[in-house]
């Protein structure tokens, strides 16, 4: 007669394992300034006023200008965004700034951006603020448009006899209120 001995071993473990895992580092988003926004060198008569409108294509027009001329050496601001090749970025920007030259200041108003291709002033995407709840001026799919170039234009209204000689540019320090871009990777 054959006998089989069946032995069952039951191992019970009561407790838990905890692993201290580090989350992966967030993807790196880098902004590289290619050019400062520049309204060029302005020549003006004793009596002067007008609106300077710089498109994201770097072309400035003077609207309602009296006694103002430009050397046309104007440049749109340009910032390249370097990020992972996938994901969506939102680009937000402040709605104004001040360009200072000594004690003279000029308000930069109606800033606008465009992506990769410059357009005339008024045809870009209006900056609507850079706070968390502000709508983005641009939404970019990095899978379709990797490393986008953000072009920046804006408007300066010159009050009557409000200029002093000099260069008004984002390269000139002393701005009391900066134009700020915020890029959020989703």
Image (cartoon, rainbow, N blue to C red):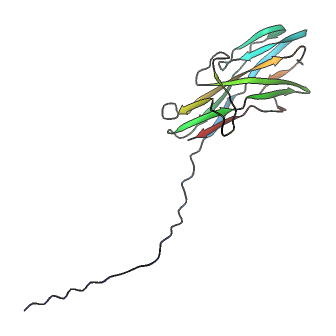
Q: Residue at x 82, y 27 (%)?
A: 99
x then y, percent, for residue 156: 78, 19
Whether 32 is drawn above or below 159: the answer is: below
The image quadrant where one finds the C terminus is: top right
x then y, percent, for residue 114: 62, 24
On the image, which quarter does residue 118 sit in? top right
Q: Residue furthest left?
A: 1
Q: Residue at x 48, y 31 (%)?
A: 144
Q: Is residue 118 left or right of residue 166?
A: left
The image quadrant where one finds the N terminus is: bottom left
Q: Is residue 69 left or right of residue 122?
A: right
Whether 5 is drawn above or below 45: the answer is: below
On the image, which quarter does residue 132 sit in? top right
Q: Residue furthest bottom?
A: 1
Q: Is residue 66 left or right of residue 27?
A: right
Does the image show residue 45? no
Does the image show residue 151? yes
Tally of marks: 0
Q: Residue at x 44, y 78 (%)?
A: 14
x then y, percent, for residue 74: 73, 17
Q: Is residue 150 left or right of residue 39?
A: left
x then y, percent, for residue 140: 55, 32
């Amino acid at each position: 007669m054959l006998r089989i001995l069946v032995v069952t071993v039951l191992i019970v473990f009561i407790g838990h394992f905890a692993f201290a895992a580090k989350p992966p580092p967030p993807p790196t988003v880098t902004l590289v300034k290619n050019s400062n926004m520049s309204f060029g060198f302005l020549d003006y008569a004793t009596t002067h006023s007008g609106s300077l409108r710089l498109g994201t294509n770097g072309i400035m027009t003077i609207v309602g200008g009296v006694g103002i001329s430009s050397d046309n050496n104007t440049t749109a601001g340009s910032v390249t965004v370097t990020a992972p090749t996938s994901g969506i970025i939102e680009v937000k920007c402040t709605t104004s700034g001040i360009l200072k030259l000594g004690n003279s200041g000029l308000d930069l108003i109606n800033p606008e951006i465009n992506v990769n291709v410059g357009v005339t002033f008024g045809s870009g995407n209006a900056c609507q603020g850079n706070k968390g709840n502000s709508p983005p001026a641009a939404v970019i799919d990095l899978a379709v448009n990797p490393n986008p170039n953000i072009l920046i234009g804006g408007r300066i209204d010159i009050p009557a006899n409000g200029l002093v000689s000099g260069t008004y540019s984002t390269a000139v320090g002393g701005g009391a209120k900066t134009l700020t871009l915020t890029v959020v990777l989703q």
